Amino acid sequence: MQRMGMVIGIKPELIDEYKRLHAACWPEILAGLAAAHVKNYSIFLREPENLLFGYWEYHGADFAADMKSISDQDVTRRWWALCSPCQVPLPSRNPGEHWAGMALVFHMD
């Protein structure tokens, strides 16, 4: 299992919309994540800095293939079309990242 943390900004005027979308996350999105071996996925909001922190656990063996399986789904692209306008990617993110990955520095079971 691999623990993954990520961060992205959010437009303050679209926070309520982002919350509304995630309060009624489409079952097909959840099923796609589960099929890609993603578990324990959470998104936290930090105000007034307007940051989203995401955490998930990856339980698969081929991360690249599983992430491709998610991004190849039409339902995912439609979901991203709604969520992405709410987000503000960090200028310091790595090439190819939308959410900026974070390094795990401490974990306690």
Image (cartoon, helix red, strand yellow):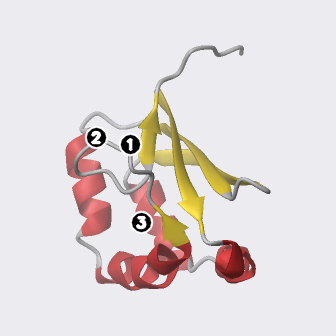
Task: Compute the Cα span from label 2 to label 1.
Answer: 23 Å
Q: Residues within 10 Å of mark 3 (few under 14, many from 20)?
A: some
Residue type, mark 3 in image: Gly
Label located before the other in sequence (2 or 1)? 2
CB-based contact (under 8 Å), mark 3 and mark 2: no
Residue type, mark 1 in image: Ser
* On screen, residue 61 above or below 84: above
The structure residue drawn at horizontal position 39% and vertical position 50%, both measured from the top left corner, is 91
Residue 15 position within the rendered picture, expressed as x and y whole percent measured from the top left: 71, 74
Residue type, mark 2 in image: Phe
Disc 1: which residue:
92
Task: Compute the Cα span from label 3 to label 1.
Answer: 28 Å
Task: Compute the Cα span from label 3 to label 2.
Answer: 14 Å
Residue 25 position within the rendered picture, expressed as x and y whole percent measured from the top left: 62, 76
* Front disc: 3 or 2: 2
The circle on residue 32 is 3
